[in-house]
Image: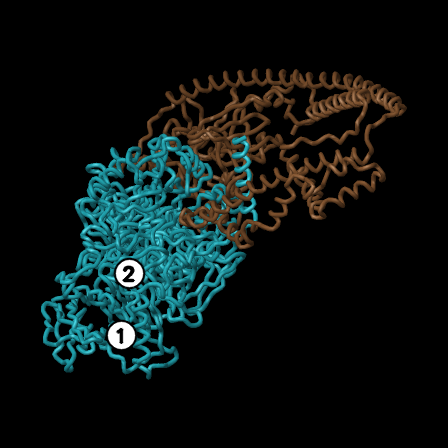
Amino acid sequence: MARSQTASRWTLLLSLVVLIACIVVPGLAVKHENFKTCEQSGFCKRNRALADNASAQGASWSSPYELDPATIHFKDGQLTGMLIKTTATNEKIRLPLTVSFLESGAARVLVDEEKRMKGDIEVRHGSKVNKKRYDEAEKWVVVGGLEISKSATLNAQTKTGFTNILYGPNDNFQAIIRHAPFEVDFQRDGETHVQVNHQGLLNMEHWRPKVEGQEGESEEDESTWWEETFGGNTDSKPRGPESVGLDVTFPGYTHVFGIPEHADSLSLRETRGGDGNHENPYRMYNSDVFEYELNSPMTLYGSIPFMQAHRKGSTVGVFWLNAAETWVDIVKKAGSSNPLSMSAHSKKDTQTHWFSEAGRIDLFVFLGPTPQDISKTYGQLTGYTQLPQHFAIAYHQCRWNYVTDEDVKEVDAKFDKYQIPYDVIWLDLEYTDDRKYFTWDPLTFPNPKGMQEKLDESERKLVVLIDPHIKNKDNFYVSQELTSKGLAVLNKDGEIYDGWCWPGSSNWVDCFNPAALPWWNSLHKYDKFKGSMPNLFIWNDMNEPSVFNGPETTMPKDNMHYGDWEHRDVHNVNGITLVNATYQAMLERKKGEVRRPFILTRSYYAGAQRMSAMWTGDNQATWDHLAISLPMVLNNGIAGFPFAGADVGGFFHNPDKELLSRWYQAGIWYPFFRAHAHIDTRRREPYLISEPHRTIISQAIRLRYQLLPAWYTAFHEASVNGTPIVYPQYYLFPDDEQGFTIDDQLYLGKTGLLAKPVVKENTFTTDIYIADDEKYYDYFDFTVYQGAGQRHTVPAPEDKVPLLMQGGHIIPRRDRPRRSSALMKWDPYTFVITLNKDGEADGSIYVDDGETFEYERGAYIHRQFHFRDSTLTSENLGIKGAKTAEYLKTMAGVTVERVIVVDPPTEWKDKSSVTVIEDGAKAGSTASLEYYEQQDGKAAYAVVKSPNVSIGKTWRIEF
Amino acid sequence: MRLPQSLFLLAAAGSTARASSDKTRPRGVAPEFAKFYQDTETFTCISNPAIKIPFSAVNDDFCDCPDGSDEPGTAACAHLSRNSPLTVAERPGNDGMDLVLALPGFYCKNKGHKPSYVPFHRVNDGICDYEQCCDGSDEWARVGGTKCEDRCKEIGKQWRKKEEQRQKSMTAALRKKKNLLVDAGRQQKEVEDHIIRLEAEIQGAEAKVQGLESSLKTVEEQERKVVRTSGKGKVNALAGVAKNRVNELRDALVAVRQQRDETRSRLKELEEVLSNFKVEYNPNFNDEGVKRAVRSWEDYAARGLGEEFNGARDRDLDEIAKADDENSGVDWEHWEKEEDGCADSDLIYKVAAYLPPSLVTFLEDKILSVRSILEIGGILTKSEEDSTSESKAVTEARDALKSGESELKDLKNKLRDQTADLEKDYGHGGIFRALKGQCISQDAGEYTYEHCFLESTKQNQRKGGSSMSMGKFVRIGSTTVEETNEAGEVVTVEKVALEYERGQNCWNGPNRSTKVVLECGEENEILKTAEDEKCVYSMLVTTPAVCDSGEDDNVAPRSKDEL
């Protein structure tokens, strides 16, 4: 009886569930109620109120901050002084100011609070929290470029009430510091480009004691000063209100870019409402946003508070170094600074307003004048992109989840069977035993080594997920060590913080603690992470950190980290501290085996580019998500973190074949190219897709592989100059105003390859914008497109990636398809040369072993190619090191098998051979040349057969 | 990893020289293609005879022929594939011709083993592809210092041993298949015999039923002649019956109310479970099914939760549920003593007139529905038609007829089943008849998969032991499987597949279903189970039943044309 009753109860429950499941119409939307709007965030509301007040008062508003002239001191490129804030009650708050002028041409404005520096405050609730304003963000973010300029000087010709400093290349930069009210204007060549506190929104909420029972007596609205409650969680705020804010104006600049991560257009919108504008400021508070929405200023998984402002002929930038929650308001106003210059293009001033919940004001100002200059200077500061292992720029196959080790081997075999190359297969969290990282499920992954050995047969790699939340379980050694060594994040009461994540009850490793690094390091050793092998790499996910039951799906802000810093102080750099720990751990897992780590991170901050790649998180299989991936990837590139990509195919839901194919055709242009899918989606490995789409996808992947030499060269460029890897239109054509908002086409490095992926359903032509009057050639059939400042219609049938080559480039390729990129190592190169108007072309290539750091000792090939006066030359760009000769020897057999010249001079019709002269060879040799004519607007081309010059040598080919 | 570069160059340079000195054929060319490479002056592209190149361009590591035939020994033409992003310039002689390679691959002589092709894109990639090329000749250029020793002796030996085993196993498989066919034939014969037997039995049973029918008739006629007396008037008798009936209905009402209360409390419990679920579920677990459930719960809740209890109606029911006496309900005593004076039909209305009208309609409605619910639930058995008092003889005769009829029905059902079974598709030669119901299983990951031929597929949890139906047998079908041929090309092959559908429903998806793809093998064995997409499984199973040949000496007559 009891049995049948329970049975029938279950049947009832089941049928109810089934019934419920049937009626539902699925639809997706972000849970807005889980994340704060500005109105719900105390300090955001306060700083916006300040801005509203200032703008209401108009000209009569005056910033209550003054630089005391008596305290100004300038020495060795550094200006110091005391900023005085006068409060409503006429209290004087002392705020030490430092303005540093750096050798790199950047300037740094730093404001702290004297009382807090001295620890002369009281914190509430008996909290042990550090009394200082957080001053260690630099430790995680800045790696160089802080050398003070020796040439910076005081400008003697200065009006009273101002202090002017000349600095930068040839002293053509000037900082004009007005004492009262405090303002700094930055000039380049006598023209103002950046104005700090021009709107008078500088705000440093000084420490004050909470006066009980006096509410309402003060004129200020204290309602958000102390405890704040959101979504059932109360933030104890032991230090009370402490936000910092500052306005930065870019006079004459209509476009600002940067401050990822947002699912929005490249050119940032205004945020104070109005048609097409946002209502809320752009928010940066690293969060696990479930089913994020598009065209929104909502925060996402990572933040880089670095912004470029761009106008014709000039790019400038600012970097707001603050690890706390940050919002940025953007308003564009008709140019007030120079009303006479309203000509053909009405210029605007872009006014930005930055505010963070805690920490110091620490602003870097970059004066350009080119986008490349900005990338370079910013990169000196926060580091350049890591030169990744070569496999990392090839194709990654991921899914939540490959369910067994046999499953992995079968996927591997299927790629071979269908002759589709791939380099890396990924395991999401289900490979673990009960969601305990550093373990394998004994039933589903009984033989991890056998699996990795199998992958290694074609030099493929495995990436596994390791997250910062450690399952809180007694008999799990990682958990035991974490707690017994005291390396976990604590709650506000100083106890180990317990929250919910994938494994259920979990604790978080505190990578701010120096002691956490050797421990984390030890966990990655082969003997500790049993079953791991040298071809295993790491994916750090959920490191915002994501806490399922925490406020805004993350940690309470009053949690405590090493150094008694609140989580509030460090939240946005939390993610990269984990990446840093993993990076250190993966450098040398076995004594003597030093390898470049490969880490994928979801959460990031400025500096992450030195250690990792990122992806745009949990997107959806919709055309809109495909479309937004391009501006998101481009924006990350100009913000200094170009190793970026979106999940190909879309994470949630099932893409149809057309969407999936188009997504591959777009995905091959992401610097980080990985397909990924949610556990509830149908399998969609490329070989499973029926024809003709399987072939379409295979061709797209093989196109990526064919161009890997160009990609690797672009990565190298990023690793030494801080440039993006795929460039937005404005970056290459900074003087062409029509191109500034274009964010749906992109250039691969400096190769002149211009791709415009199709991101609309049922669309079989596309318009490609061409900025200059060079000829552009269709990549596949050499159709010519020409006409500056115009959009050109290019056919885009389903099997075609719209792709053009700008005249004037030499593009390196490898045409032989192999199973993985590692197996292309010894293959010969093909060069495609497109001549410019003057009949010339340039290009370069960078090659190294793709896995070690031997390149630092000269083990690489870096060549510059020119085509001038009918001669193709290869010149060395490398600097000889201890390992150069040895490396060149191993590469001596790697040659150029084919040179394709597109649109050659017609005289070549009668040419049948070229002369090849290799450096050091006694005599030249000849190679045959064949000229092919084409009809219907397609350019002719010539092919040199087997010049067989070595890639690492100096040579020339005379046509 | 490194190798003196001179060696590479030597090898590269030597290739053409060796090709001409090796009188037989250039590197990578199979004997069957040797005839194309005999002219030592000029080479004619095999599929494009209009294109002629000097013989020195054969195997010079540059692709000259649009069909790749000039590079039988290198990877230079490996890009000639539909999978490649070809531009006009690296397709020699391009004018939109089809991309068909003239050669199946790089030919490995594999002395000591059997010759084989390795796909061109694997030539000189630094990996020894011993599976196809045991002599290591695919890595002749020794790129990056790769050296592939000749392992044909050892591999060939292993292969022959395996091949011998395979042959043996194949012989055994065919023998088993033969046995299966014999069994299947015998089983079919059994069915046929059974049918004959049943047909005879049915004839007998039909005659018996006829006999019983006529004897019932006879008894009934006799019975009508007997005058029955009754001690009481009709009204009194009816009152007695009605009393019993009302009591019975009252009891049923009480039982139904109890049941209703239970259901109510269960509904309440369930609603609580779901509303807690809505509050406590975690959207970050990214489970679309959970989210969908929450959303529909919200819709459901918006329509109003479990009905409010109507106190007034409950009090009515309390009243109705009380036993009858002089003051409430019907005074039965009065009726049982009443003189008989009315016609039967009037009486019924009169009885009803004594009951409160609400009770009448209520009882009529409720009792009917309650009964049917209880009967469907199997809680009450269907009540027999109220029998008027009947003589024992009639009853007996009627019972005998009934049992005779049901016996006949059983037999007819059996015959229908057996005939249907005979009509059913049991595959080529009816062979699966012999396997039906045989179960095999395989441990894989956290599950044990089970396949019972022509019955069901199941997934059993190894931890915890819960079992999940992956489908019930529906048909023998076929499926195309993509396999690689000798040249490494993907080709489609037709295979027998057993299809199982309508398994347990998935939380987020369809009912589970399984396609069991059969391959020839000595044993009935599950090789692999995969979830191709959510809750759609495929199982690769070996069985002698699908091995080639064996049906010719077919023992069983074919009931149906095979696939």
Q: Position of residue A375 (x, y in %)?
A: 27, 61
Q: Is residue A849 left or right of residue A254?
A: left
Q: Is residue A379 visible?
A: yes
Mark 2: which amino acid?
A: Glu
Q: Chain of mark 1?
A: A
Q: Position of residue A689 (x, y in %)?
A: 51, 44
Discs 2, 1 touching: Cβ within 8 Å: no
Q: Is residue A869 visible?
A: no
Q: Is residue A554 above or below residue A892?
A: below
Query: Neighbour class for label 1 at 10 Å: few (<14), some, many (≥20)?
Result: few
Q: Describe the element under mark 1 as helix, strand or loop.
A: loop
Q: Earlier in the sequence, mark 2 or mark 1?
A: 1
Quadrant of the frame with the C terminus of chain A: bottom left
Q: Is residue B188 left or right of residue B174?
A: right
Chain represented in brown: B
Q: Is residue A511 above or below residue B481?
A: below
- According to the picture, the residue beneath numbered tag 2 turns out to be A227
* Extreme-right residue of the structure: B225
Q: Nearer the viewer, residue A533 or B458?
A: B458
Chain represented in cyan: A
Query: Neighbour class for label 2 at 10 Å: few (<14), some, many (≥20)?
Result: some
Q: Which mark is residue A219?
A: 1
Q: Chain of mark 2?
A: A
Quadrant of the frame with the N terminus of chain A: top right
Mark 1: which amino acid?
A: Glu
Q: Nearer the viewer, residue A444 or B264?
A: B264
Q: Is residue A8 left or right of residue B251?
A: left
